[in-house]
Structures are given as C-alpha cells and as structure tokens.
Amino acid sequence: MELSKNFEHQASEQKWYSYWNERKYYNSTPDDREPYTVVIPPPNVTGVLHMGHCLNNTIQDVLVRRARMQGKNACWVPGTDHASIATEAKVVQMLREKGIQKASLSRDEFLKYAWEWKEKYGGIILQQLKKLGCSLDWERTSFTMDPDYYQSVINVFVDLYNKGYLYRGKRMINWDVKAKTALSDEEVIRKETQQKLYHLKYRIDHGQQTTDDGNTTVDSGQSTEDFITIATVRPETIMGDTAICVHPKDERYAHLHGKFAFVPLINRRIPIITDDYVTMDFGTGALKVTPAHDMNDYQLGQKHNLEVVDIFNEDGTLNEEAQILIGEDRFEARKKIIPMLEADGYLIKTEDYTSEVGYSERTDAVVEPRLSLQWWVDMKKISGPALDVVMNEDIKFYPAKFKNLYRHWMENIKDWCISRQLWWGHRIPAWYDAEGNYVVAVSHEEALKQYETKFGKSITQLSQDEDCLDTWFSSWLWPFEVFKGYSNPGNADVQYYYPTNTLVTAPEIIFFWVARMIMAGMEYQKEIPFKEVYFTGIVRDKQGRKMSKSLGNSPDLLELIDKYGADACRFGILISSPAGNDLLWDEGSNEQGRNFNNKLWNALKLVKMWEGRQTTTDNGPQTTVENNFAVEWFGNRLNEAKTEINQLFKEFRLSEALKTIYSLIWDDFCSWYLEWVKPGFEQPIDAEVYAKTVAYFEELMQLLHPFMPFITEEIYHALKERAAGDDIIIKQYATAGTANAEVLQLAAQLKEVISSLRDVRVKNQIKPKEAIKLSIETANDASYKRIASILQKQVNAESIDFVSAAVAGTISTVVQKDKFYIATEQAIDTSSQKEQLLKDLDYLKGFLVSVEKKLGNERFVQNAKPEVVDVERKKKADAEAKIKAIEESLASL
C-alpha cells in the first residue's frame, strides 16, 4: 500500500472506530474466559467532554484494551446519570426560552419536556467518547432512569426504610435558593470570597439575669457597659439570632454570664450563654447564634435548647419572621440593613474580610444553610462492612494514601440527606394522608394496604411525596444494576461480571460515590463492587489552576482532537498524569503526542522502503552478519521492557508505563535499532532481518495500542498484508521472555562508544563523510568483535584494528576502561586533544573524591541497601580505570 506523507489522523480515527465497532470487538458476553469488567463513572446527561473526562476515560480505555489483548473477556459498560439538578436547570432554561414557566406546568407536563430534552441532548457526551477512541460496549448502555433501574432505586428505598435505615426528619442542610432544593456536600463548591465584617452593638438588659437553676432575677448591680459587640459577615441574619455565646473562661465577658441582650432593630431579648466552642481570639470573642441559618449555630442551639427562628423563604427572600425587610432578597437586605443599623447607632465599624463561601455547583448561587424536613439514611447502620473491606484490602486503593482518608471519613460518617425538591429524578415512594401521616411503599396500591395495616383504617387516596431522590442514591447501585443484579437477581451477566475489576474515578467523590457503592454492594450483593480503585488527579493548567469554564482555561477537547488527533490528546493527558496527583497540562503535551505520531510514521516509511530490497542468497549478504547482534539485542531489550511495563501496570503507574514505551520506541527502536540494521545506500537487507524488524515493530505497536489505538492499528495493517480478523485491537500479547543481561550490557557499551566517537569527530571537525581508521586497546577483544561491524558503520570507520599499545599520531579517547585511537588523513592537533584529556581527567578525579567520601561514611555503608553500596563501589572502580587510561594516553602524546 502507498503511504501518505504524514499520518492522517481524522481519516484513520473514523475508519478504525467504525471498523472495530462493526466487528463487535467492543462487545462482551459471558464465556469461559477470565472477565475484566469496568463500569464507566456515568457522566451527567447534560455533560460535554472536557479534560477531566479525557483523563478518566483514557485511563479506563487503556486498561480495557490491554485486558482484551491479554485474552480476557473485557467488558466496559457505558451509561449516563440523569443528574437531577443540572438537567432540571437545563429544562427550565429551555422552557423559559419558549415563554413557559415551570410553575405553570403540572409535574407530568414538566417531565414530558424533560424526557424530550434528554432524548435530544442526553447522549452527546457518549458520542463524544467515540471521538476519543473509547472501546465501550455500546450494546450495554445504561441510564439511571431506565425502567428496571428506576424500579430498583424505588425498591431499595423501601427496603432500607423497612430495615430502619431510613428516616424523615428536620435537620440542617445545604439549600440552593435558585434551584430551591437541598444539596449534598459534594454539590457545594467552596470559594474564597471578599466580604465585609460588620461590628455590631447588642444592648445589654441589665434588669434581669438567669441564675444557674434557671430562675430569672433582678440585677441589683449597675454595669457601666451597655453593649456587647459581635462581628458578622451576615448582618441580614440578625433577626434570626436567639442567643449570644462567649467562652466561659473569657474574662472580658464574665460579668455578662446569664444576662440578656437585645437584637438590634427588632429588640428581641436573647440570652448570653457560654460554650468553649467559641474562639476567644477571633473577632470580638462574642458570637451571635442563629440556629436556623448556620450549621454550627444549629448544633449550639440543640445543645443549649435555643429557639429556632427561620427568617428566609425557600428562594432566599426574608419572610415575616424577620419582622423587617420582608420580601427582600437576602443580599439586597444586607445592603439595606447597614444604613438602618448605622442610623440607630448599632454599627461600630466595617472591615474588609476574606473567607470561604459555599456556592451551588449547578446554579452558582450562594448556598444557604437551612433547617429543613428531609429524608435521611442512617449511615452508621450500613457503613461498617464498607469500611472493613477497604481496611483489609479486599478492595485496593491506588495510590494507597487514600485509604487513610477513606477510613477517617467512614469513622466520622454523617447521615445522608437523600431528598431533593425537584421533579426530574426518582420520586420518593412515600404516601401521605391529609394530616401528614405517611407510609412507604413501591406503589399507590401497596401504600393503601400498608396504610390500613399501620393506622387501622382504610382510605381511598394518598398523595405521593413531591420530592425526588438525590442523584447519588441511584448511582450507588451502578456496579451491579447495570447488569440487572438487583432487578433480576442471580442472572448470568451479574454472576459473570460482578464484582467488577477496576473503578477509575476522582478523589473528590471518594465519599459521595465510591464509599456508597461499596455500601450498596455489600448490602445487596453481599460482595464488594470492584477489586481496585484508581484515583486520578485533577487536571490543572500550567499555572496550577483547576480547569473551569469560568476561568476560561478549559480547552475545547473536541477541537483539540480535530487539531492533533485522538492519539496525541490521549498521549498528552497521560504522559503527565501520576496516579492520584494533580497534573499540570498545557497544549505542548499534545504537540509532543503529535511529534510522536510523526516519528512512528517516519519509522514506518523507512521500514517499508526496505521491503523490496530483501535478499536471501545462500551465503547471505554482508548485512546479515552485521545485524545479527542488533536483532539479538533488540529482542532482549523488548523482553526487558515488557517485564518492566507489566510491573508498572500492576502498580497502576500508567504514566510511567507510557514513558517506558515512548523511550523504547523513540530511542531504542528508532534512534538505535533501525540505524544499526539500515542497509547502505541501494544495498539489500537480509529477509530474516527484515522479517524480524517488522515483527519487532508489530510488538511495539501492540504495547502502545492501549494508549494510542488509531495510529497503532494503522501501522499494524500498513506493515504487511493481514488476513481477515488479524487486527491489533484483539491481537494477544506474547509472553515476555527473559532478557540476557550480558547482551543488554554490551549494547549499552556499544551506544556509549558510538556516542563518544561521534563526539570526538565533531570536536575535531572530522566531516561525517570522511572515513577514519579506528584502533581499540581493550582487554575484551571478543566482545568488541561481536559489535565491530555495527560500530564500524556507525562511526564511518574503514577499518577496526585491535592493538595492545597506544597508536602514535592519532586522536585518542577513553570509554569506560578501553582506549580508542582515531587516525585520519588530516593533521592531528595534539594540543587540543591534550587539553580535552586534561579536562576529562580533572572531572574524573573530582568525581572519584565524591564517591570515596560516600564510601568512607560508615553510616551510609551500614544503613544503605547492599545493592546501593555495590553501585557506588562500581562507580569507584570505573573512575579509577578511566583515570588510569587517560593518564596513559597523556603520557603517549
């Protein structure tokens, strides 16, 4: 086949992805092979491909493609998450553009629009994954609101409720005033925000105080202080204050213990309480307590039995409990209350202040802590087994450092708020009568039966809870329900594919998804959901900033794929992504990937040039003799690299594995091996050498294929004609053989000698086309005779002689313990040669001193590993040998 000048990535990607898909190479059904199962972390149906997806899904594809080539039955399950908040926001926006308000629609009418939106836009991200080359089993695509999946979520809710693991209660939650729903902690983004700190006076009530026994008495003393000062960033919440708290040991306020103060503007009388929760050296040391609008204040309120005054409506406006500024938005109220406080003399001063503020991940609204009646999972009742299986390493974390983070969270686990005030999602199966009495059941019919049993009376109509479930409550069933392990227990698929093998995810959802999947797996399958968890890092720009649309530093991944190719983008993201650590990405890494593509393509063109120049004469051409060592060496180098790569994959060090393959191809194969076996101008190449070269090229493409699938399949088919079904995507890896250390060492020596002699030629201005005569003084003639023909060609030597003494009138150099003498037709400048040798001698003597100093350190010799000490001793011996050789060379000049 005729090769194009350059690798045409767009044509190749389209051709091969369709080809693999048509032949169902991605598809999996249970058989007698070992399964390798990965379930995709389901992206939101609202999502489009970004750099985080690129990293996460490239890693999964690398693992899946490699498993497929190892002969395993690889199954990678795709799917999407219904993403309640994000999707509902998109639908509301779509309706607004049509002039329709959500409030004007019934639930069923709204859901009809939502499903229309999902069908039109919800599969975009899955289609984009194809552009990245992801080999997902598309016939297994799941959605968290598929009918069977939906029913499983409802049944799990009912089951947990019946077990006493679920309850309904009024507690503090994160509230999104824009979406008008509760949020999980994961959906709250903490941002450093510039604010104002307002110092406010609260007037003291000197007339009465509370004694230790709770009785109120008249204060007989007269204090000179009429006010206590608090500092707050939220003056609009003072109308919800129900106490002021000071540290019991703070002497500044000891005389106020048990007294009362009045809230500015509304004159609510509130107690001054003590608690060591208060930090004495922060602010004024006096804390206003607003139990309805602060998580920590709520805890204080519970502890001290304080009144709870909720002053906000669900949209963040002030309600009648606020008494003033009713109907104003909370931030407008903040602007208006400051001049009111100032006018009445309550504002002492204002300071600039920086602190973290929670924002809704979906709407970017400032999150409001709110006391709300919600549904909760009692996590302590279900979390125990999920902690055990990680701590005893039934499930292994990579990197292992996340194990301790997981343990800390699980040992301090909090109850999970699972209700959301939305319509798009799994509707909570709780059913209410007119008085608010309720039952939990999978259907209305079942609810009526349960109601009669529970309350002793029959009823014809119950109303279902309006709320839907937190998205995580459906996705925690993902590893088994994609195989219908709950809806169809014990089916062939779940028995074969579950537990899955590797979960690839981000550390920030270790609690919100990973931990909960483990809990669900242990609860409903009595087995772990996966054997390994690989945590990726966060993709950051070269300035270290997390990539985001708001910062404008998140590139369009599809544009990058069009520009550089999917292979180059996969290479670019993986070459710099150590497991569990954030990676700094810039477009230069894609350019490196594209350059690698060009290197591979040029290597292909070079090898194909030799295809028609093969010869198989009886005696074999000279090239056969010349290239025997090169062929032998690269076979051993390949075995050495394969062993190393296998180990790196076991340790999930994928970036290092790619770097190893990159160096193996770029340096060892292209820069050395192909140069060593390359025939002379218009000279033939031995057919055996050519066949071996093609075979090596194929093996290299196999090693690289999981990382860069398109160019490797393209090159594999371009190297020679293939039978039907002989495709690299399913070609099985050859077992790594044992590498011959002696051959590898001799090749390393050959590379060093070639590099040194080329350097000597350059320094002495010997033109590349000018042949030299080379003499070698060595104690190991036999080794050099094995590599002499390659060395002769690589340094353009017309002859190589072995000598036992220095050769007069030559340029000399030392490599390891051996001396090399170069004779040319041009005059030799012995003065510059002597100058270089003296420089080398000076360097080596300094190096020897540093090594001897290290070996003279008893603590180092006693504490270092024996192999480390041996390396230092070898360095010492080599330096001494080189010094001796240089001194002898200098003496002969």
Image (spheres, rainbow, N blue to C red):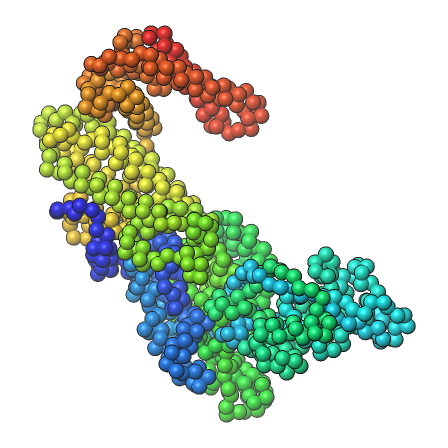
Number of numbered labels in the structure image: 0
Q: Is residue 318 left or right of residue 696?
A: right
Give the quadrant of residue 335.
Answer: bottom right
- Residue 20, compared with residue 577, is above or below; it is below
Tell whether 373 sits left or right of 229. Answer: left
Q: Is residue 467 above or below residue 39?
A: below
Q: Which of these two is toward me, 825 or 789?
A: 825
- 69 and 787: which one is in front? 787
Q: Residue 97: which quarter of the image?
A: bottom left
Q: Quadrant of residue 786?
A: top left
Residue 56: give x, y in percent of width and height: 39, 55
State the image coordinates of residue 297 (x, y, percent, origin top left): 67, 68
Going 55% across and 26% down the picture, which residue do you hit?
860
Q: Residue at x 51, y 55 (%)?
A: 389
Q: Residue furthest front?
A: 343
Using the rendered image of the protein, determine whether residue 101 is visible from the camera's viewpoint.
yes
Q: Which residue of the protein is positioned furthest toward the left in this rendering?
A: 617
Q: Is residue 73 visible?
A: no
Classify residue 744 as left or right of residue 183: left
- Image quarter where the C terminus lies is top left
Where's residue 81, x and y in %? 41, 68
Indicate left or right for 427 with 37 as reference: right
Answer above or below: position of 24 versus 742.
Answer: below
Residue 477 lies, in percent from the top left, at: 45, 66
Residue at 56 percent of width and 78 percent of height:
314
Residue 202 to residue 405: above or below: below
> Which residue: 44% across, 61% down?
550
